[in-house]
Image: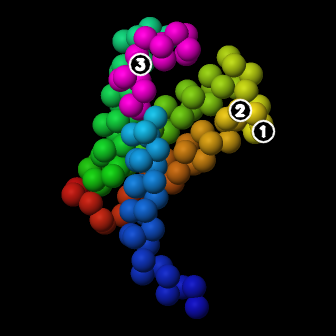
Amino acid sequence: MLEQLAQYNNIGLFVLRLAVAIIFIYHSLPKFKNTKGMAQMMGAPAGAILALGAVEFLSAVGLALGIYSQFAALFLAIIMVGAMGMKIMKWKVPFAAMDKNGWEFDLILFAASVAILFGGGGTIGLL
């Protein structure tokens, strides 16, 4: 019975790409609006934060439009490895916590990016 759902594989991949893209676009915007503040919070140079925001934004747009989805997913997966590394090693953030955002959110974004990287983005898109 569920085998019939396989015909909608491309729709599922499109929905996954859109969800990941929306999250990354949302999280890239503060890096443009408050570069200095984000740099201080993350302990990185402002130029690095601006570059990070640009890679997040452009990769997310690529995912949403289906333009080089696998390359976009690769960049986003790398970003998420860095985000998890910062949270785990530098900031000592637990996997999950009631009073703050743990790194479980980062892990699911990493996994979704890896799924798109290895499985492809589907046929819905510009390229």
Identify the residue position indicated by label 1 in the image: 98
Is residue 95 depicted above or below 114 in this figure?
above
To which residue does mark 3 refer? Answer: 34
Residue at the location (46% across, 35% down)? 27
Q: CA distance from mark 1 to mark 3?
A: 27 Å
Distance from the alpha carbon under mark 2 to that under mark 1? 6 Å
- Residue type pointed to by label 2: Lys
Query: Mark 2 highlights which residue?
Result: 100
Q: Position of residue 50 (x, y in %)?
A: 36, 19
Mark 3: secondary structure: loop
Q: Which amino acid type is marked by label 3?
A: Asn
Mark 2 is surrounded, within 10 Å at the Cα level, by few (under 14), some (14 to 19) or many (20 or more) other residues, namely few
Compared across the picture, whether 20 is left or right of 47 comes to right
State the image coordinates of residue 20 (x, y, percent, origin top left).
46, 49
The magenta-colored residue range is 28-43
- Three-letter amino acid code at the position of disc 1: Met
Quadrant occupied by the N terminus: bottom right
